[in-house]
Every structure is written in C-alpha cells, then in structure tokens.
Image: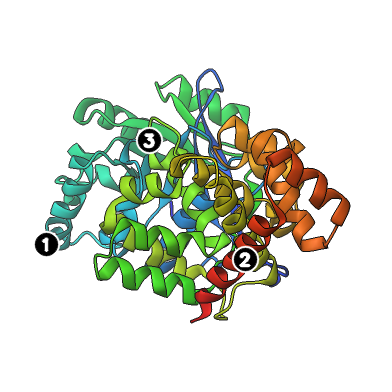
Amino acid sequence: MNSPTAHESPSTPPPASGPSPVAMIARQAIVNAQQVVVGYELFNRSRTANAHTAATDVTLVFNALSHAGSEELVGKKLIFVNCTHESLAGGHLELLDPDKVVLEIPPLGHAASEEVATRTPILTGLRNRGFHLAFNHTVLQSAYAPWLPLADYIKLDLSVLAPDQLAVLISYAGRHCKAELIAEKVETAQQYDMVSTQGVQLFQGYWFARPSLVETKLLAPAQASIIELINHVRNQSSTDDIEQVLKKDAGLAFNLMRLINSAGFGLNREITSFRQAVMLLGLKKLFRWAALLLTASRTGGAPSSLGQTAVVRGRLMELLALETLPPEDADQAFVVGIFSLLDVMLSMPMDKAVGLLNVPDAVSAALLRREGFLGDLLTLAEACESSDDAVFNRTAGLLHLTSQQINLAHLQALAWADQLGD
C-alpha cells in the first residue's frame, strides 16, 4: 500500500528553477461501481520509492494543500495519503479537515500483538477526531484485531492476492467489519468482474486511470519572514503584529490564503483578508503552518525583487485608499497590490493565478481588467514605478488625489517595506 502501482517508476525530478519551488505529486483516482471518482490517492514523486519517511508525508500534504498550479489537485474529493506510523502523531494533521482525508495506515511488518496494542490509541484518537482510516488486507489477520473496528476502508491488492485468497478475505470482511473494500491494482476487465461480482464497490488501478503527474508550485517566502512570523506567534503577539508580517511578504500572503481557502481546510466560507485568516487559523495552527513552510522554503533571507515590488504596491495602495475608505475596505487595496504580480511569480496567466485565490469581485476586476476604484489605484501604483507622467496625472485626477499625497504615500510604502530586512 505504501508503494505505487506495479508499473510505476518514481523518479526524482531535476531541481526547479525560478521563484517557485516545485514538487512532483502523482494522483490516482479511486472510483465507485459507476466509475465516478470518489477520491484520489497521492504519491510523492519528489523522492525515491524507498525514501518514504514522516518528513515526506508532511511535505506531501503541505504541497497538496498549498499547490499553486493551474488545476486543483483533488478539488472536493477525498484525499488518500500514505503515512508512516511516525507521521501519524505529526502536528501537520491539525491543519487538515479530517472529513476530507483518508490516512492509509501501513502494516507493522510483523504480527507483534504488543506493538499493535501500543499503536491502537493513536489510531483511535485520529478516528475520534474525524479522520478516515484505510488499511491493507493484513488488518484482517487476527494479530490486528484491535485495528479492524477502526477501518473505514480496506484495500485489496490484486497484484499479490490470488483469486481464492480474495474470495476468502472479501467474505470475512463482510462478516466482521463495516469497512468499504477497495480493489487496487485492477488492470483487466476480468479482474474487475471477479471482485465486483463478489461485492467490492470501490476500485483503483490502470483499468480505470493511470496516475497523473502534477507539478506543484509554492510561492516561496523568505526564510527570514517565516522566522519572524514564528517568533511573533510564539510570543503570542497581537493580531495586528502578525498581520503586518504577512503583509510584508507576498509568498507568505499567497500561501496562507491558498491554504485557508483550500478544500482540505474545510471552511464553509471564503476568507478574503489576512486579518480574517489569522483570527480563524489561531496561533496554534498558524505556528504549525509556519513551521511546515519553513521546512519547504528556499534558503536566503531577503524577498525577491518581485516580491518587494508587490509589497510596496500593496502598502502604497492601502495608504491611498485610507484617504477615502474605512480600514476594512482599504485592506482590499493591499490585497490587490500584493497579488498584482502573481502571474509573473507563478509563471502563469493572471486569470489562472487569480483563480487560485478566493477574492472579492472588486479585487478580481482590478487585477484582471484594472476596473473600478481598486483598478485605478493599481494603475496609479504602476505609474509611480514606471514614472509614466501621463498615466500618473490622469489616474490621480480620477481618484481626486494630489501629487503630494501620492508621493508621500509612496515614500511611506518604501520605508515600510524596507523594515522587513531590519
């Protein structure tokens, strides 16, 4: 269960170039009898097959939830994630919506009833928190009896089980547990017919879908920014102080908004401001997230020049918006500014980049078409950078702002952004 299907050959991709770290994740559909996808099993392709550790489990989940590619990795389907027993106690699981996640629990490699008993409380705790648990067919052995009531899914590997073994296991599972059975490594119509006629309702394998490789991206923040965030959280700083750290690094801002609005996080409403994100996440989860981000981040203390430009834009637009708008509306101006270079940072069209974030219509209109008040502010900020006097004067007039107001705000924005390296 912890290895890919029989014909897959995991490989380590070449190092990523550009501003975004890249991880290779393969996903394979799990379907029902009507061939409707109910979930995806994820495989980490950024490691070799024998390098499965607690650390790679954490990285896989983190990259899947924070993925900044052109498509959702799993959407609203179940996520099946291979685990090590060491990773089951990891804090990264606190970032997930348990109802969306199936933890694939490996066998112990030997039928040591004492070790089974030792690990049972951890598995029980995960199940009580709402996680789904999947096991392979060994959970039907007597040594694993304490685990059997915890099983939501049992995977039957058709590459290692003979037809007569399968018949016995399917019959036994039907009498002794309530778990749904998944036939995996189904590669022929004959195999499908054999297990489906015996009552198996879920299937995985080449007969239905081969694993598809997805190149996941993260917008990398500076490590200094992540460390600053961690220090603020550990010191239980105010929401205002924590929000300021997020606002000074486009990578931090993007990854947080992606995570908190991902299906795996399980919120019922869209979060559109950093203050909301901080308050909903809470200090404990924010610390977990920052620590995971630190392990996945690149080296180097300073943000990229693009990130610095985005931060200055955001702050300039926020200061100018505050001339006429209340603070909560001015926050949207900051969001537009700091995300205005996402297309360059992620190497994708802006409409696809904006599609990765849940943003209000006014923010989207500004980013994509420079429409509305926020669009005019963004045009003005760009004119400040390019020294385009004609656009500067025209847009300043539309916004009823004087050159003195704009220049002062620009200086303040530059000084504010420079404080990041202090």
Amino acid carrying label 1: it is Glu
The local secondary structure at tag 2 comes to loop
Q: Is residue 49 above or below residue 272?
A: below
> Image quarter for residue 112?
bottom left
Give 360 or 14, whichever is nearer the viewer: 360
The local secondary structure at tag 3 comes to loop
Horizontal side of 100 relative to 89 (left or right) equals right
Of pointers 3 and 2, the one earlier in the residue sequence:
2
Q: In this view, does 260 lie above or below 417?
A: above
Front: mark 3 or 1: 3
Horizontal side of 178 relative to 274 (left or right) equals left
Amino acid carrying label 3: it is Leu
The color scheme shown is rainbow
Q: Give the labeled residue for mark 1.
A: 114
- At a point 26% along the width and 31% down the height, the residue shown is 172
Q: Give the labeled residue for mark 3.
A: 267
Alpha-carbon distance for marks 3 and 1? Answer: 39 Å
Horizontal and vertical percent position of residue 83: 37, 56
Q: Is residue 195 above or below residue 101?
A: above
Of pointers 3 and 1, the one earlier in the residue sequence:
1
Q: Give the labeled residue for mark 2.
A: 21
Horizontal side of 90 relative to 23 (left or right) equals left
Give 315 or 167, whichever is nearer the viewer: 315
Is the residue under label 2 in contact with that under label 3 (CB below 8 Å)? Answer: no
